[in-house]
Image (spheres, grey):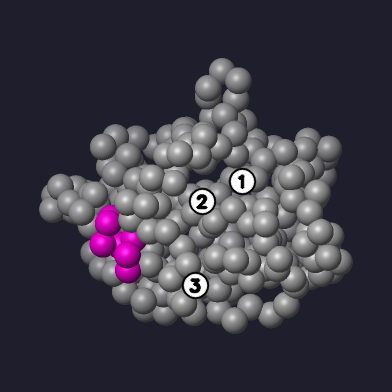
């Protein structure tokens, strides 16, 4: 799912009241056909989606098993199924799941795509997918991880879903996007962001977090190692972004963080 644009947010730091478990915010967010229409109308979102897809194709081996977390209306699931991948998927929004089921109907009927229709609590507590297929790569496009409260629990779930060589590629919101640095809400929350590594924003639509790279590194460390950071924009030649090694502090890493609204994080299993 796509976290709505919060450039006009009046949020402030504070404790989350269940960003992914209290679903009342869904009443304020678009879904299904309206969600797809808004995506299609936004050029930056179209470019970010295209870049993420190209990056997945460069990381996942042909015919790989993918798990799409926060799958939304199924646009990515269908895209990858059409290219020979098998896709298991989950989204917390029942409206999205309804659209997904229709959009990917032929692939669901053939078994190439499956959709988990349970609650979020059922999803994270279930050991594996229904058929036991282990994913080569978990994908999560348009920042679903930014609306999840407990990332320790989620990365444990990703560990259970993936095979021994499994990886996670997640699109997340930059905590320091240059456009946000021009807003009052960012500067009001900056001390909390720097101290805690994350900042909760109630926002006008979906409540969500902004999180520093170090926070993602810490919450995933038991099961995964954060290895690379990619800008959420294509290269000038149209290819997938190259990315930077986040184990090394460099100006290039900082430029990747501030230059795009979305950044793509690659995690690799620690027990590889």
The boundaries of the magenta stretch are 94-100
Kindly indicate whether the residue at mark 1 contacts the one at mark 2 (C-beta within 8 angstroms). yes
Q: Position of residue 168 (x, y in %)?
A: 51, 52
Residue 217 in magenta stretch: no
Measure the C-alpha gap from mark 2 to mark 1: 8 Å
CA distance for labels 3 and 2? 17 Å
Residue on which disc 3 sits: 25
Of helix, strand and loop, which one carries label 1? strand
The residue that mark 1 highlights is 262
Q: Which residue is mark 2?
A: 142
Q: Quadrant of residue 200?
A: bottom right
- Mark whose residue sits in front, 1 or 3: 3
The answer to whether residue 62 is above or below residue 159 is above
At x 51%, y 59%, the residue is 144
Task: Please tell me which residue is depicted at 32% across the width and 68% down the height of the picture.
Answer: 94
Kindly identify the residue that appears in the image at 75 percent across and 72 percent down: 13
> Is residue 85 found left or right of 175 in the rendered image?
left
Residue 44 place in picture, x, y as percent: 55, 37
């Amino acid at each position: 799912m796509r976290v709505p644009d919060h450039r006009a947010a009046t949020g402030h730091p504070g404790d989350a009241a269940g960003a992914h478990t209290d679903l009342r915010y869904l009443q304020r967010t678009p879904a299904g056909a309206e969600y797809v229409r808004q995506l299609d109308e936004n050029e930056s979102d179209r470019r970010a989606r295209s870049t993420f897809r190209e990056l997945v194709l460069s990381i996942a081996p042909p015919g790989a098993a993918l798990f799409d977390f926060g799958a939304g209306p199924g646009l990515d699931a269908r895209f990858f199924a059409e290219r020979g991948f098998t896709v298991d998927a989950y989204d917390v929004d029942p409206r999205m799941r309804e659209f997904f089921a229709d959009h990917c109907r032929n692939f669901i009927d053939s078994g190439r795509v499956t959709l988990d229709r349970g609650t979020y609590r059922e999803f994270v507590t279930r050991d594996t997918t229904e058929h036991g297929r282990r994913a080569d790569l978990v994908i999560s496009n348009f920042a679903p991880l930014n609306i999840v409260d407990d990332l320790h629990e989620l990365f444990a779930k990703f560990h259970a879903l993936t095979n021994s060589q499994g990886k996670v590629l997640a699109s997340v919101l930059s905590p320091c996007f240059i456009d946000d640095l021009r807003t009052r809400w960012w500067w009001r929350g900056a001390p909390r962001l720097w101290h805690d590594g994350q900042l909760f924003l109630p926002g006008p639509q979906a409540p969500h977090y902004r999180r520093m790279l170090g926070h993602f590194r810490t919450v995933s460390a038991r099961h995964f190692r954060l290895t690379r950071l990619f800008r959420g924009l294509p290269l000038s030649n149209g290819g997938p972004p190259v990315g930077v090694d986040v184990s090394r502090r460099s100006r290039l890493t900082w430029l990747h963080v501030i230059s795009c609204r979305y950044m793509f994080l690659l995690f690799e299993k620690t027990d590889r």
